[in-house]
Amino acid sequence: MAKFCIHCGKKLEEGEVCSCQANVQVQSDSIGSNLAEVIKGMFVKPIDTIKAYTDEKSFSLALILLGIFSVATSLFVLSLIKNLTEVATSSMGGLTLYAISSGVVQIPYLKIFFICLIAAVIFIFMYTGLLYLVNSVMFKGEKSFKKVFAMYGVNSVITTVSLLVASIFMFLSPILGVIIFLLGSVLNTLYVYKGIETLGVKDENKHGYIYLITTVFYGVVLAIISLIFS
């Protein structure tokens, strides 16, 4: 009796394993190894890593990296809110502190986590979309959104690590946690600027304008969204 692959329908000989599943396994192994290489590379040879992984083939890897970044962002916001709440309640008196600790007043941490997660994903696609439009349409650079997205995803490693470390240190010293986050953000900004060099605009004099215009547009969009939902 003939056997067929349950995944792609290919006819198989007795004992044969379909090649489609072998390809899936190789691809998943490749993503896992590339993920480790990018995380290590962004701390050892960041510029070389950005250049090596800024391509369309790294789009799936970038999705994973930016997914981790979104989770790290949500965790940082939760740690910030928790510490600010403790500071506020201690200064407002024992009655407020009792109300929160006893459960009379509850902070919806789970709801905040998912709201921040969704917001982070939206803002990621918003920024990369604007960067693509400025770089590709205004300055005639790289025409592939996937390549722009991959560059931004690789760069997110630094910010992700700084967010996770800052979330931990936030419980020891909120000021120290914020400083770690700001340092990571500054470093990320420098690497994104360097990453623009890989997006097809050969004139280095225009790279600063690409970054500046994208950031200004992004700020305007955020301001409009804030006014709408205020």
Image: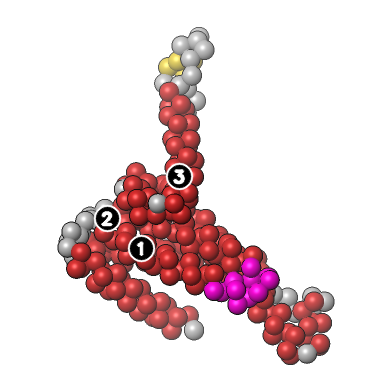
Is residue 175 one of those drawn in magenta? yes
Identify which amino acid the numbered label 2 is placed on: Thr
Residue found 42% across the figure and 64% down from its top: 188
Image position of 47 (left or right of 121): left
Residue 192: image location, x then y, percent: 35, 63
Identify which amino acid the numbered label 1 is placed on: Val
CA separation in Å, label 3 and label 2? 19 Å
Q: Secondary structure at mark 2?
A: helix
User: Which residue has dot 3 on it?
Assistant: 37
- Nearest the viewer among 95 and 52 is 52
User: Which residue has dot 1 on it?
Assistant: 192
Count the numbered circles shown: 3
> Are discs 2 and 1 less than 8 Å apart at CB?
no
Image mark for residue 198: 2
Is residue 72 one of those drawn in magenta? no
Precedes in sequence: disc 2 or disc 1: 1
Residue 76: image location, x then y, percent: 58, 67
Image mark for residue 59: none
- The 10 Å Cα crowd at callout 3, few under 14, some 14 to 19, many 20 or more, is few
Precedes in sequence: disc 3 or disc 1: 3
- Nearest the viewer among 194 and 97 is 194
Residue 60: image location, x then y, percent: 41, 47
Q: Which residues are magenta?
A: 169-179
In the image, residue 159 sits, relative to residue 219, either above or below, namely: above
Residue 143: image location, x then y, percent: 22, 55
Residue found 52% across the figure and 70% down from its top: 181
Residue found 48% across the figure and 31% down from its top: 25
Q: Secondary structure at mark 3?
A: helix
Precedes in sequence: disc 3 or disc 2: 3
In the image, residue 90 sits, relative to residue 193, either above or below, namely: below
> Taking the image as drawn, is residue 114 in sight?
no
